[in-house]
Image (cartoon, helix red, strand yellow):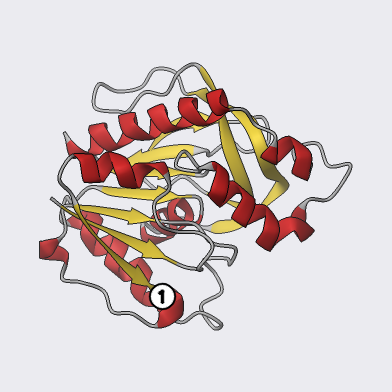
């Protein structure tokens, strides 16, 4: 199994908890680092594509021209029926690749915050728990792509997770985050931790999460991967 992931900045990558899970199942893992001008592999060679996060907007094509190529690549992967998982910026890129608009959300969500599963899902949809606490770090949201299934919402952001067809899932939140990568995010994006905002936690709250928080999201990440690879 060849798993390829797309990385947008040095401090958001390496797949977090998903890496060990995939390696334990015999995966060969490769990466395209867009910030290093690396090339994309042939789509036919990939069994799972994971699109990671990043602080830029998917609309910043003038500053990051590789975004145009990346969206086209994701669109082709989905059209070919290949499994695709988008995380945070990655979810926004999936939405954009399917023709949906991406724009600032009314509120930023940063920290350990709840999501709620959607009701009345079709049989082929992934199912989240009724409520789960996940790791959020985003300021933008997106329209739901045509024919996509909404999987989860939160009080601050309706479109938290969605599914396109049987093999593509976008997550506005992070399930793969580990303690080290949470620390890296805080160190590189601490300026976003504005006090007094209803959905932005403090540095202490973010980094003070216990092992149970991480175990819960890692279990969910494994369930999403199992679903996509089934």
Please state which of residues 188 and 64 is positioned toward the viewer in this rendering.
188
| Residue in view at x 47 percent, y 31 percent | 217
Q: Can the viewer see residue 147 in this picture?
A: no
Q: Residue furthest right?
A: 196
Left-right relation of 216 to 103: left
Residue 51: which quarter of the image?
A: bottom left
Please state which of residues 85 and 106 is positioned toward the viewer in this rendering.
85
Left-right relation of 87 to 186: left
Please state which of residues 140 and 49 is positioned toward the viewer in this rendering.
49
| Residue in view at x 56 percent, y 32 percent | 134
Q: Can the viewer see residue 156 in this picture?
A: yes
- Label 1: few (<14), some or many (≥20) within 10 Å? some
SS state under label 1: helix
Tell me the residue that label 1 is attached to.
Answer: 34
Whether residue 146 is situated above or below residue 220 in the rendered picture: below
Q: Position of residue 44 (x, y in %)?
A: 10, 63
Quadrant assignment for the C terminus: top left
Please state which of residues 106 and 192 is positioned toward the viewer in this rendering.
192
Q: Position of residue 148 (x, y in %)?
A: 36, 41
| Residue in view at x 38 percent, y 35 percent | 221
| Residue in view at x 26 percent, y 74 percent | 40
């Amino acid at each position: 199994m060849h798993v390829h992931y797309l990385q947008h900045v040095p401090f958001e990558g390496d797949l977090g908890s998903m890496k060990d899970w995939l390696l334990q199942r015999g995966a060969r893992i490769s990466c395209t680092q867009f910030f290093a001008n690396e090339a994309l592999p042939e789509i036919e060679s990939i069994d799972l594509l994971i699109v990671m996060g990043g602080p830029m907007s998917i609309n910043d094509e003038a500053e990051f021209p590789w975004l145009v190529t990346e969206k086209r690549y994701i669109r082709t992967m989905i059209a070919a029926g290949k499994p695709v998982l988008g995380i945070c910026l990655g979810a926004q890129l999936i939405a954009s690749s399917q023709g949906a608009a991406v724009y600032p959300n009314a509120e930023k969500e940063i920290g350990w915050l709840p999501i709620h599963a959607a009701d009345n899902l079709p049989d082929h949809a992934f199912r989240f728990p009724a409520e789960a606490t996940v790791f959020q770090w985003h300021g933008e949201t997106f329209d739901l792509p045509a024919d996509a299934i909404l999987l989860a919402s939160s009080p601050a952001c309706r479109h938290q997770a969605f599914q396109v067809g049987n093999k593509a899932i976008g997550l506005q939140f992070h399930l793969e985050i580990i303690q080290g990568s949470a620390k890296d995010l805080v160190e590189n994006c601490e300026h976003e931790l504005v006090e007094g905002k209803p959905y932005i936690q403090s540095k202490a709250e973010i980094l003070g999460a216990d092992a149970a928080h991480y175990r819960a999201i890692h279990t969910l990440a494994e369930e999403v991967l199992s679903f996509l690879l089934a």
